[in-house]
Image: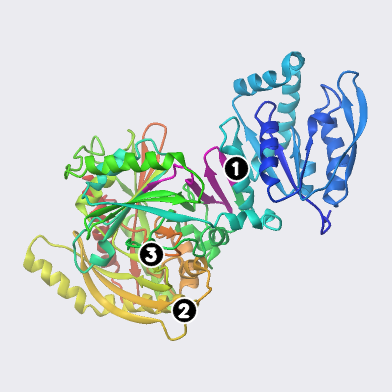
């Protein structure tokens, strides 16, 4: 059935009895009436008796939903519960928004007539207490009888899995407003809720400066021990050159607070959780990102120079390539993307030796904001005495890794890649594999990351802690930076040599990398690819290569790095810019799309987080994302953890397979040495 142009927005509020649906419907209706006409319908008025769940659903769909979806008023008979028969004739007008509430409101036969489905959950004991407190003794003799009908219907229908918004009932006064905000983020609600979406843009950022040099690891531990999700974007090579520009700021934040949210994308659905409310947005990730971030919302505060002024932080996994020209292998066990929205954050300015506390303000009172500033201020000062980072081991004993590919198997894949080059299907193939380990005890992600950053400091280190996994990285490579004024910068790495403890030998390795025609060719191919990626959204003539095949030195490797810069066309969606360049060409090869197809065949499984991007997406429109390399992924299990480390290298026609395998070992060294582990000597 196609709704008429004047049809209302129909929202179902469903869930088991006593979950809090009726209260939510009343409070949500009151909020929505600020900008819309709203009518409500309660299914309890139409159920034909205590055995009438199934019959009530049929009546509701036929007598109420069908006319409303056509823009016509609904006329229906209310059930006379005292006399056990149909009672008075009642009417429900279409209005702008119609809320239909009750068990069965989102039944399968109703969904085609609904614009959005809200599902309310609560523990069984709490639901029973709530329902009996509301309806008194009249409901108690029938509770089990009605609950059996609910269970029978839910076992066959499963409306909770198709819900657009999932709410934990009885969770406090903030829930109805969070539900209203959730509705504004659903694409199907945009036609009526543009006023609410516009209201979300009236934001500014409060900034407090503290002159202090806290220990960042101790500060992260002090601030986020109980956070559901937290992110530390860490410039751990402070003061190093030539990476000083990239090593100036570190950012710490979690998903708590009034504006905090947690978003993850899997299987075409982005789930955004805020307090007791989770919204499911069924559309491609980069389309969601465009609406959630793609344009500037606030100005960077005066006297504050970091590009991040609150917004989204986290990772975009490699499997998002399915939206940018790549294929789709089996899903990664981790989300394709995981981001927190930080409505408050701590930024360390290593050059100025200052700490900035940022908090979001929408012009309404926020009693908790002052408490948060006071708590963080104390933590900054308490950890400002250069407290040594914990030396507690992350593992009782070093983890033992196994390689997904044996040496012989990886060398065979290199030869297959070279056959593809010979056949003219690609010029360069960035072939990867992984090391995995099962650990029988729980792993503390912070302790693991602190060991990694000591062994291999880097400008784009990051620790991303999620409820069931963590990502700990010492990445040296910038994927893409977007300045708030539209400047673009990519800094691909291609070409690696391991370090030596002997200064003379180490200098020779650096000279060898600088003189290597093969490594320069690898780097230049990716430079050309990125010039093309950025040109799609750049002002014509603005794409330049300001640095070509320069050498940067890190704790365990020398790297060949180039810099491509451009100027963004005015009015361009910044999310589209990221999508155009994603995934990083330094992790695919060139040309990108055909080479990704070759890699899917050679590798045979999802890369997951590895080879994606991690960093921030600021409300100022700025972004700074690193390539996810030199990265340990920690998946928490019931009795321990599963560890994985992605490694690989670029294959060209001139590649010597045995040397490429040695490069894989070299790239793994930074992470493995930090864990006290060794590269597996698989046959």
Residue pointed to by mark 3: 431
Point 28% across, 46% down: residue? 449
Q: Residues within 10 Å of mark 3 (few under 14, many from 20)?
A: many
User: Image point 20% across, 79% down: which residue?
Assistant: 515
Q: Which mark is residue 538?
A: 2
Q: Nearer the viewer, mark 3 or mark 1?
A: 1
Q: How far, Cα to Cα, is label 2 from label 3?
A: 30 Å
Magenta part of the chain = 253-279
Residue 323 in magenta? Answer: no
Magenta stretch, main secondary structure, is strand
- Tell me: 341 left or right of 97: left
Of the pair 282 and 518, the residue shown nearer to us: 282
Q: Residue furthest bottom?
A: 541
Q: Earlier in the sequence, mark 1 or mark 2?
A: 1
| Image location (x, y in percent) of residue 60 | 84, 37
Q: Earlier in the sequence, mark 2 or mark 3?
A: 3
**Relative height, residue 674 to residue 517 (above, below):** above
User: Pointer 1 and pointer 2: residues touching (CB < 8 Å)?
Assistant: no
Give SS at disc 3: strand
Q: Please tell me whether residue 274 is drawn above or below residue 662 in the rendered image.
A: above
Q: Relative to 47, is 345 on the left or the right?
A: left
Does the image show residue 607?
no
Where is residue 310 shown, x and y percent of the image?
Answer: 42, 55
Instruction: Point out which mark residue 177 bears.
Output: 1
């Amino acid at each position: 059935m196609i709704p008429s142009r004047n049809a209302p927005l129909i929202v179902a509020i469903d869930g088991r009895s006593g979950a809090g649906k009726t209260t939510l419907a009343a409070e949500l209706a009151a909020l929505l009436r600020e900008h819309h006409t709203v009518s409500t319908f309660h299914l309890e008025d139409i159920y034909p008796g205590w055995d009438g769940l199934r019959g009530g659903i049929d009546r509701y769909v036929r007598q109420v939903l069908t006319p409303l979806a056509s823009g016509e008023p609904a006329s229906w008979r209310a059930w006379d519960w005292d006399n056990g028969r149909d009672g008075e004739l009642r009417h429900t007008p279409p209005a702008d928004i119609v809320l239909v509430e009750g068990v069965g409101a989102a039944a399968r036969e109703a969904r085609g007539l609904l614009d959005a489905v809200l599902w309310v959950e609560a523990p069984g004991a709490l639901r029973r207490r709530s329902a009996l407190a509301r309806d008194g003794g009249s409901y108690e003799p029938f509770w089990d009888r009605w609950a059996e009908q609910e269970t029978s219907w839910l076992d066959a229908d499963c409306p909770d899995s198709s819900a657009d918004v999932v709410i934990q009932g009885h969770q406090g006064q903030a829930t109805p407003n969070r539900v209203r905000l959730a509705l504004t983020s659903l694409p199907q609600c945009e036609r009526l809720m543009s006023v609410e979406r516009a209201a979300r843009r009236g934001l500014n950022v409060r900034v407090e400066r503290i002159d202090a040099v806290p220990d960042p690891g101790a500060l992260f531990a002090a601030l986020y021990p109980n956070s559901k999700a937290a992110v530390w974007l860490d410039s751990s090579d402070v003061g190093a050159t030539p990476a000083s520009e990239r090593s100036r700021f570190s950012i710490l934040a979690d998903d708590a607070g009034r504006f905090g949210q947690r978003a993850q994308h899997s299987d075409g659905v982005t789930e955004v959780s805020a307090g007791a409310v989770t919204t499911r947005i069924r559309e491609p990730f980069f389309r969601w990102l465009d609406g959630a971030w793609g344009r500037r919302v606030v100005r960077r505060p005066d006297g504050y120079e970091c590009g991040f002024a609150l917004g989204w932080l986290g990772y975009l996994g490699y499997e998002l390539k399915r939206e940018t020209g790549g294929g789709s292998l089996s899903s990664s066990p981790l989300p394709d993307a995981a981001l927190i929205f930080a409505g408050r954050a701590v930024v360390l300015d290593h050059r100025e030796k200052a700490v900035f506390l940022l908090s979001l303000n929408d012009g309404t009172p926020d009693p908790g904001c002052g408490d948060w500033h006071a708590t963080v201020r104390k933590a900054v000062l308490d950890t400002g005495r250069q407290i040594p980072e914990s030396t507690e081991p992350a593992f009782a004993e070093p983890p033992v890794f196994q390689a997904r590919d044996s040496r012989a198997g990886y060398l065979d894949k290199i030869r297959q890649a070279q056959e593809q080059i010979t056949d003219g299907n690609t010029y360069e193939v960035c072939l990867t594999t992984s090391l995995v380990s099962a650990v029988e005890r729980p792993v503390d992600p912070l302790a693991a990351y602190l060991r990694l950053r000591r062994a291999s400091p880097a400008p784009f280190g990051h620790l991303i802690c999620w409820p069931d996994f963590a990502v700990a990285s010492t990445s040296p490579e910038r994927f893409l930076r977007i300045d708030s004024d539209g400047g673009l910068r990519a800094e691909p790495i291609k070409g690696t040599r391991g370090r030596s403890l002997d200064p003379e030998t180490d200098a020779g390795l650096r000279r060898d990398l600088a003189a290597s025609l093969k490594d320069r060719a690898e780097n230049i191919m990716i430079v050309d690819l990125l010039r093309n990626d950025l040109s799609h959204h750049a002002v014509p003539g603005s794409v330049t290569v300001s640095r070509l095949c320069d050498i940067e030195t890190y704790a365990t490797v020398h790297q060949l790095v180039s810099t491509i810069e451009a100027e963004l066309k005015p009015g361009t969606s910044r999310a589209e810019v990221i999508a155009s360049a994603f995934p990083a060409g330094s992790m695919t090869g060139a040309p990108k799309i055909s080479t990704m197809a070759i890699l899917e065949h050679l590798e045979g499984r999802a890369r997951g987080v590895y080879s994606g991007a991690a960093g921030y997406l600021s409300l100022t429109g700025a972004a700074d994302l690193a390539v996810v390399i030199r990265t340990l992924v920690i998946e928490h299990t019931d009795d321990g953890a599963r560890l994985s480390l992605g490694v690989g290298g670029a294959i060209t026609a001139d590649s010597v397979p045995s040397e490429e395998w040695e490069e894989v070992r070299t790239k793994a060294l930074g992470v493995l040495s930090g864990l006290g582990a060794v590269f597996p000597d698989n046959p």
